[in-house]
Image (cartoon, rainbow, N blue to C red):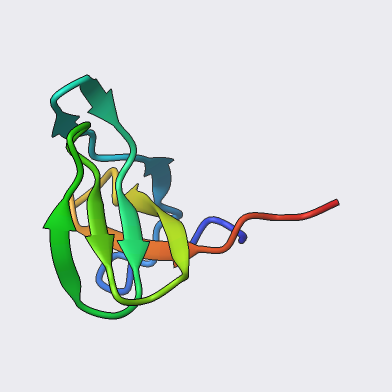
C-alpha cells in the first residue's frame, strides 16, 4: 500500500504501529474477522473467524491524525 495522504492536510502520512501489551510483552495489533470468543493462556485473542491481518497505523506529521488499515500479508 502506498503511504496515504491526510484527508485534512493533504500531506503524506508516516507509517507506524501501536503496540499491544500482552502477557509475553508487546506485539503488533491484528484485526480478526468474526466475533471475539476467548483469550489463550499466552494472552492471544481467539475469534469465530479464520482471517487475521496486521493493522498498520499512519500518522499525519502536521495535525497528528491517526488512521489504521488492516493489510493482508503479501505473498511472493
Residue pictured at 34% horizontal, 53% vertical: 30
Residue pictured at 47% horizontal, 69% vertical: 51
Q: Is residue 5 visible?
A: no
- Looking at the rendering, which quadrant does residue 41 occupy? top left
Residue furthest out toward the bottom:
34
Q: Nearer the viewer, residue 66 or 18?
A: 18
Is residue 15 left or right of 59 when viewed as pictured? right
Residue furthest out toward the right:
76
| Count of marks overlaid on the render | 0
Residue pictured at 32% horizontal, 74% vertical: 7
- Looking at the rendering, which quadrant does residue 31 occupy? bottom left
Q: Nearer the viewer, residue 62 or 54?
A: 54
| Rendering coords of residue 32 (x, y %) | 34, 67
Is residue 10 left or right of 3 when viewed as pictured? left
For residue 50, above or below residue 43: below
For residue 27, above or below residue 69: above
Is residue 74 left or right of 10 when viewed as pictured? right
Q: Nearer the viewer, residue 53 or 69?
A: 53
Q: Quadrant of the N terminus?
A: bottom right
| Rendering coords of residue 75 (x, y %) | 78, 55
| Rendering coords of residue 58 (x, y %) | 35, 51
Q: Is residue 70 visible?
A: yes
Residue pictured at 86% horizontal, 51% vertical: 76
| Rendering coords of residue 3 (x, y %) | 53, 56
Residue furthest out toward the front:
41
Q: Nearer the viewer, residue 70 or 13?
A: 70
Amino acid at each position: 500500500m502506498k503511504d496515504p495522504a491526510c484527508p485534512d492536510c493533504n500531506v503524506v502520512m508516516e507509517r507506524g504501529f501501536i503496540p499491544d501489551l500482552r502477557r509475553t510483552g508487546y506485539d503488533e495489533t491484528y484485526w480478526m474477522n468474526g466475533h471475539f470468543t476467548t483469550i489463550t493462556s499466552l494472552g492471544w485473542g481467539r475469534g469465530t473467524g479464520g482471517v487475521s491481518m496486521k493493522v498498520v497505523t499512519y500518522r499525519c506529521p502536521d495535525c497528528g491524525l491517526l488512521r489504521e488499515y488492516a493489510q493482508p500479508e503479501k505473498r511472493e
